[in-house]
Amino acid sequence: MLKEFQEFISKGNVMDLAVGVIIGAAFGKIVESLVNDIIMPVVGAIFGGLDFNNYFFGLSSNVHSAALADAKKEGAVFAYGSFITVVLNFLILAFIIFLMVKAVNNMRRRLEREKPAPAAAPPPADVALLTEIRDLLAKK
């Protein structure tokens, strides 16, 4: 069983998947920072200094704080601002991935256009012989 597990792990697809997951996690952190540290402050400034992360309403009568972190300590809250931030993270990530896939597809198309057309393979010997006979008969 250990040998089978080693064979499974050493396959290229599993390693590629592992690398993809690790890079994806790191890329996710970059997008999260982009949204939280760059985009959301600009959006907040446009909407009068609003911070989406602190948009919530209490589901309990014990919740009286204005900050989400404090309100969560007081009771259940419906934190829709955090959801808005996560949706923006997703949309930005999806758009960046779309642009990357589009660029790769354009590069592939460009390479295919630049590649010379493959030379036509010569016909099989029997077809070549029949063509020769046909041409000889046509001359007579």
Image (cartoon, rainbow, N blue to C red):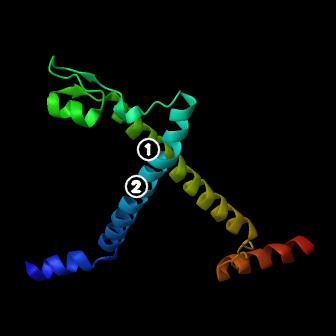
Q: Give the residue at mark 1.
A: 89
Q: Which mark is residue 133?
A: none
Which sits in the foreground, 101 or 11?
101
Residue 13 x %, y %: 33, 71
Q: Are marks 1 and 2 in contact (CB under 8 Å)?
A: yes
Which residue is situated farthest in the front direction here? 65
Q: Quadrant of residue 139?
A: bottom right
Tell me what residue is drawn at x 44 percent, y 52 percent. Answer: 33
Quadrant in which the N terminus appears: bottom left
Q: In the image, what residue occupies the spot 39% across and 65% down? A: 23
Label 1 secondary element: helix
Q: CA distance from mark 1 to mark 2?
A: 8 Å
Q: Is residue 16 left or right of residue 4?
A: right
Q: Kindly tell me whether residue 27 is visible in this rendering.
A: yes
Q: Amino acid at mark 1?
A: Asn
- Which of the image's four quarters has the C terminus? bottom right
4 relative to 20, above or below:
below
Q: Residue at x 72, y 79 (%)?
A: 128
Residue 84, percent from left and from top: 40, 33
Viewer-proximal residue, 27 or 6?
Answer: 27
Residue type at the position of mark 2: Gly
Residue lying farthest to the top in this orientation = 61
Looking at the picture, does residue 20 appear above or below residue 132?
above
Looking at the image, can residue 140 be seen? Answer: no
Q: In the rendering, at what x and y percent does residue 17 appear? A: 33, 66
13 or 24: which is nearer to us?
Answer: 24
Residue annotated with mark 2: 28
